[in-house]
């Protein structure tokens, strides 16, 4: 009951504060009736990304969301996060308990949202993915749904009253991923497939809109004295 109230209230408020748009919603809609397990893998640009993705999911069974433990230090925020399905994970510590909880939740029929980079990024280009999402998908037979968060504002970051785009891609099925056994080679292959799918979503958006993605600046080359001569 609390979840439904929060989702309704947040959806109304955020649609007033942002120009919110979802592309590819049909790919998520399939999971509301099929009962297939799924893991949403999204890039992470802003602390509000999970809210926008839950809005894109809409009404339906509450998803489970992995969130970094630091966000749960504040008791009020911790209560709110837990109401919408989030639970804490200790980054960089091999949090086996978090993996086991995620697996158990998915086996009850809940979808899962995870940011495989493990942290927020300042650019549209993504950092190297961690293995957690793929271990969970392998243990549950879940599909992976690639999602791109795009903020096509002048600053190319989230701005109040600016556009927010949640672009959802065609799922990578468990049969595509072939993660049974969870070997390092299988995990590497699944990461590469997912990275290509997520990069493809950004490329597709750029081609259709003319958006120029925000990329990390190249490091300046140090010129030695010999090169000046």
Image (cartoon, rainbow, N blue to C red):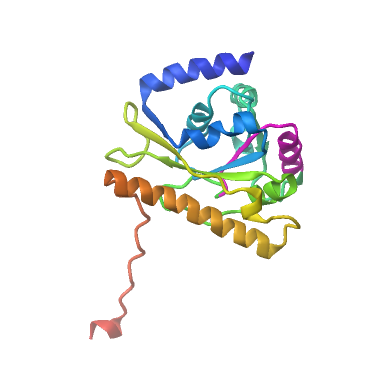
> Can residue 125 be seen from the camera position used here?
yes
Viewer-proximal residue among 224 and 136: 136
Seen at 75% across and 37% down, the residue is: 101
Percent across and percent down for residue 68 are 61, 39
Q: Is residue 148 left or right of residue 33?
A: left
Identify the residue at horizontal 37%, vertical 51% (top origin).
203
For residue 36, which quarter of the picture? top right
Q: Nearer the viewer, residue 147 or 66?
A: 147
Quadrant of residue 162 within the rendered picture: top left
Residue 55 relative to residue 21: left or right: right
Residue 99: percent from the left, percent from the top?
72, 44
Q: Which residues are magenta?
A: 97-116
On screen, residue 171 versus residue 19, left or right, reads right
Q: Is residue 151 above or below residue 124?
A: above
x then y, percent, for residue 186: 67, 61
Residue 8, compared with residue 184, is above or below; it is above
Task: Give the residue drawn at x 63%, y 40%.
Answer: 38
**Front one among 5 and 209:** 209
The N terminus is located in which quarter?
A: top right
The answer to whether residue 123 is seen in the rendering is no
């Amino acid at each position: 009951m609390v979840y439904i109230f929060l989702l309704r209230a947040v959806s109304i408020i955020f649609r007033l504060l942002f120009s919110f748009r979802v592309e590819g919603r049909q790919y998520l809609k399939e999971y509301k009736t099929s009962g297939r397990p799924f893991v949403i893998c999204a890039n992470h640009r802003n602390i509000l990304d999970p809210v926008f993705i839950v809005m894109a999911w809409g009404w339906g069974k509450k998803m489970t969301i992995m969130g970094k433990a630091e966000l749960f230090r504040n008791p009020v925020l911790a209560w709110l996060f837990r109401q919408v399905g989030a639970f804490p994970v200790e980054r960089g510590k091999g949090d086996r308990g978090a993996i086991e909880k995620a697996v158990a939740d998915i086996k009850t029929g809940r979808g899962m949202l995870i940011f495989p980079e493990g942290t927020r990024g300042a650019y549209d280009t993504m950092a190297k993915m961690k293995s957690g999402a793929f271990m969970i998908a392998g243990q549950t037979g879940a599909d992976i749904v690639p999602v791109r968060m795009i903020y096509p504002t002048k600053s190319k970051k989230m701005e109040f009253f600016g556009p927010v785009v949640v672009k959802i891609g065609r799922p990578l099925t468990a049969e595509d991923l072939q993660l049974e056994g969870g070997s390092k080679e299988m995990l590497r292959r699944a990461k590469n497939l997912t990275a290509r799918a997520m990069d493809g979503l950004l490329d597709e958006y750029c081609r259709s809109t003319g958006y120029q993605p925000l990329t990390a600046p190249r490091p300046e080359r140090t010129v030695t004295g010999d090169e000046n001569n």
